[in-house]
Amino acid sequence: EVQLVESGGGLVQPGGSLTLSCTASGFPFSTNGMRWHRQAPGKGLERVASICTAGHMIEYADSVQGRFTVSIDNAKNTLYLQMNSLKTEDTAMYYCATCSGDRWGQGTQVTVSS
């Protein structure tokens, strides 16, 4: 069964850090690029970070550039999103997905609040 499972979300104060993980089963990351997306309450889906084309193309949304870092551990079939200097506007449900968009996880909630 093909499955993507996110973890690592939670409540953090502004300026804090979190690391999200997305573990895949049923297909290898090495043949699929991966992305992180997020959706804040009342807003549309935003592409946050991408690591596509066998890890050679890494891109970030302007809103997270310099604060977030995306990485893949192919041996563990796990995608990561290191989030630093978090802001209240980073509050959202975060989803991992393949670059092709054909597979999505169920999401993990990140809340940034004092």
Image (cartoon, rainbow, N blue to C red):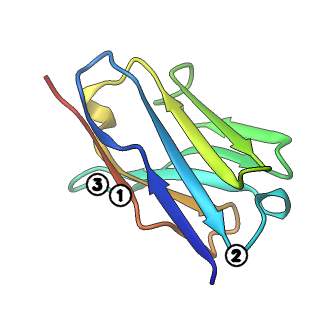
Image coordinates for residue 93, horizontal then vertical, percent: 33, 53
The residue depicted at 21 percent of the width and 56 percent of the height is 42
Numbered disc 3: secondary structure? loop
Disc 2 residue crowd, few under 14, some 14–19, many 20+, Cα 10 Å: few
Relative to 23, is 16 above or below? Answer: above
Q: Name the residue under label 1.
A: 44
* Number of on-image labels: 3
Residue contact at pointers 1 and 3, CB within 8 angstroms: yes
Observer-side mark, 2 or 3, equals 2
Q: Mark 2 points at which residue?
A: 26
Q: Is residue 80 visible?
A: yes
Observer-side mark, 1 or 2, equals 2
Foreground residue among 6 and 64? 6
Lower position in the chain sequence, tag 1 or tag 2: 2
Left or right of residue 79, residue 110 in this image: left
User: In terms of image quadrants, where is residue 16?
Assistant: top left
The residue depicted at 86 percent of the width and 41 percent of the height is 56
Q: Can residue 61 be seen in this view?
A: no
Q: Mark 3 points at which residue?
A: 43
Image coordinates for residue 91, horizontal then vertical, percent: 28, 39
User: In terms of image quadrants, where is residue 13?
Assistant: top left
Q: Type of residue at label 2?
A: Gly
Q: Which mark is residue 11?
A: none
The residue depicted at 55 percent of the width and 38 percent of the height is 81
Lower position in the chain sequence, tag 2 or tag 3: 2
Numbered disc 1: secondary structure? loop
Q: Distance between the residues labelled 2 and 3?
A: 31 Å
Image coordinates for residue 69, horizontal then vertical, percent: 60, 29
